[in-house]
Amino acid sequence: MVDDKLKKNEGEQLLKKFTEGKYNELVDEIEKLLKEYEDSPFAYSLLGNALFNLKNFKDSIKAFEKEIKVSEEEHFLPYYNLGRNYEMLNNSELEISNYLKSFTLNPKKFETNYNLGMAYSRIEDHDNAEKYLTNAHILKKDEPMALINLLALLFKMKKYSLGIEFASQANEEFEKYFQYCYNYALLLYETKNIEESNIMNEKAMVNMQTENSPIFLDSLGLKTNILNDQLKNEESINVSFEILKNDQNHYSALKSLVKSYAHLGNHRASIFFNRLADGNIRFEIKDNGNIDLFLYHKEKISIDG
């Protein structure tokens, strides 16, 4: 909102340039105007946002700090914008402190809660991450990323039942997001809801735009575990090797092969893949027949001991 420090038409022209994305022109004009209107919070706010969009984060910080200094009342927004700048500069301490100040002034802003949750998540402060991501989800239950990241966090914290509770209350529209489906599938799998996990994981793979991406391979990795639990070990082995053709070190696929071969009574192969998963040996995997050939070449590596 244009403040009374600027003429209304001047403020509206500046705002128009901002919405048109003319950030360089805008910065030049504001810096000229500030020689006359040096106590305009609106001008400093607009300058800070323009500089942020130009990725000039250090000067953007100076603009928002000046906005705070010349403002007659404290407002949450400049602190929120300072938090965004420090996030881009990977300064977690100042990022969080400014977001917390913004939160104190306006605890109901979705973006502040979400960004705080993600900031705490990045520094592995899971309890605070859970607090603010939960706040964000409650404030905007139709916003997918808050719930998606909350589910991922609760999985990491082994709060599987709580994660399922949140996921089960989500709108069906969320099922078009592969990350939601995959995170939900992981939570269901850990609580032994194998069939439901399989259904949700299949939805995840259908929704993924890029096959053989890391997240797609992770989803296939979950599928191999589900197949093993369904005693479909041969099918699980085939899927595991499809993963390994794209990622030789995919831990979930290697561990799934350990389980598959153990179920089938091929303990030599099970031991081999367990050592491969733990990084004790290296081997180029080309297809699932390759392992049988390898096991006969004991001069290359012994898997008996």
Image: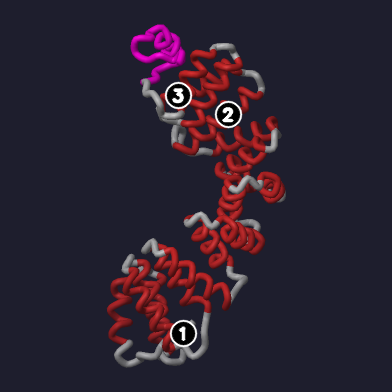
Was residue 209 drawn as part of the magenta stretch in this picture? no
Quick one: which residue is furthest to the front in this view? 305
Residue 259 image offset from top left, x and y in percent = 57, 22
Would you name the residue on which mark 3 appears?
275
Q: Identity of the amino acid at label 3?
A: Arg
Q: Quadrant of residue 132?
A: bottom right
Q: How far separated are the C-alphas under marks 1 and 3?
A: 66 Å
Residue 19, above or below 14? above
Q: Main secondary structure of the magenta part?
A: loop
Q: Identity of the amino acid at label 2?
A: Lys
Which one is nearer the viewer's eye here, 167 or 50?
167
Was residue 299 drawn as part of the magenta stretch in this picture? yes
Q: Identity of the amino acid at label 1?
A: Val
x 30%, y 81%: residue: 29
Which mark sits nearer the N-terminus, 2 or 3? Answer: 2
Quick one: which residue is furthest to the top in this view? 296
Q: How far separated are the C-alphas under marks 2 and 1?
A: 55 Å
In the rendered view of the protein, which quadrant contains the C terminus?
A: top left
Which mark sits nearer the N-terminus, 2 or 1? Answer: 1
Residue 219 image offset from top left, x and y in percent = 54, 34
Would you name the residue on which mark 1 appears?
2
Residue 171 image offset from top left, x and y in percent = 68, 50
Q: How far separated are the C-alphas under marks 2 and 3?
A: 22 Å
Q: What element carries label 2?
A: helix
Q: What element carries label 1?
A: loop
Specify whether 15 is left or right of 28.
right
Residue 124 image offset from top left, x and y in percent = 51, 54
Residue 230, above or below 191? above
Would you name the residue on which mark 2 appears?
223
Q: Is mark 3 on a helix, strand or loop?
A: helix
The stretch of residues the image draws in magenta is: 284-305
